[in-house]
Image (cartoon, rainbow, N blue to C red):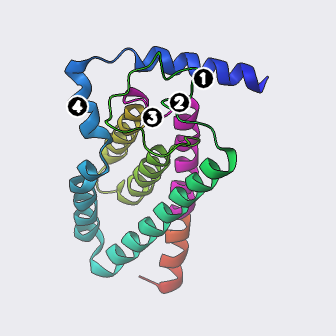
Amino acid sequence: MLDQIITYDRDLFLLLNNLGNTNWDGFWLFITNKFSSIPLYLVLIWLSYKQFGLKRTLLIVAAALLMIVCTNGLADLFKNGLQRLRPCYDTNTNELMRLVKASCGGKFSYFSAHASNTMAIAVFFAVILKQKYKHIGLLLLLWAVLIAYSRIYIGVHFPLDILTGIFIGLFFGWLFVNLYTFILHKMSL
C-alpha cells in the first residue's frame, strides 16, 4: 500500500514538475526564495502594530517566531527520521525531472519546511488580523500555496511532502493562535 502511494506521489511530481518551462523559472525561483517573503513579514508586523500597538505586536512576533522554530524543527526531525530522498536524489525521478534550482538542497525531503512554515504564518496572521483586514486570510493562503507549489516546480519536493507540510502548518497556525489568545488573556493585554 505504501509503495503504491509513493509511486502515485512520484508520478504526480513528474507531471507537475514537467509542466514548467524556462519562461516561468525566474518567477518560481523568486517565489521559493525565503528572502522574497521578508517584505510581507514586515507588512504583517506593521499591520499588527497598527491594529494592536507595541506590546501585543511584540507578543505576536514572539509567538510567530516560536511557531516557526517548532514547524521547522519538526520538519527536520521527520526528514532525518524518515530519510525520504528528495526528487533530485531519487534515482527513479532525477533523470525524468526538471531541476530548476542550481543545487538540490539537503538530501531528504519529507516533509517540506517551506510549506509548513508559510502555512503556519498564513493561518496565524489571518486569524489574528481578520477583524480589521477581512480578505487578508485569502491573500495569505494564496501566498502559502504558491510557495508550497514552488517547491514541486523547482524540483526539490514531492507532492506528499507539500501536503504534509501544509497540514502541519495548518495545525501549528491554529495551535499558536490559541496559545497567543491564552497568553493575551493571562497578561490582560
State the mark number for residue 158: 2
Callout 1 touching callout 2 (CB < 8 Å): yes
Q: Nearer the viewer, residue 143 or 20?
A: 20
Marks 4 and 3, how far apart at CA: 16 Å
Q: Position of residue 97 (x, y in %)?
A: 44, 19
Marks 1 and 4, how far apart at CA: 24 Å
State the mark number for residue 27: 4
Of the two numbered discs 4 and 3 in the rendering, the one whose residue sits closer to the viewer: 3
Marks 2 and 4, how far apart at CA: 20 Å
Query: Mark 2 or 4 closer to N-term?
Result: 4
State the mark number for residue 9: 1
Q: What residue is drawn where x is 43% and y is 44%?
A: 105
Would you place residue 111 above or below residue 49 in this image?
A: above
Secondary structure predominantly adopted by residues drawn in magenta:
helix
Q: Position of residue 132 (x, y in %)?
A: 29, 57
Secondary element at tag 1: helix
Q: Nearer the viewer, residue 180 or 16?
A: 16
| Residue denoted by label 3 | 156
Marks 1 and 2, how far apart at CA: 7 Å
Mark 3 belongs to which amino acid? Val
Q: Is residue 124 magenta?
A: no
Q: What residue is drawn where x is 23% and y is 23%?
A: 24
Query: Mark 1 or 2 closer to N-term?
Result: 1
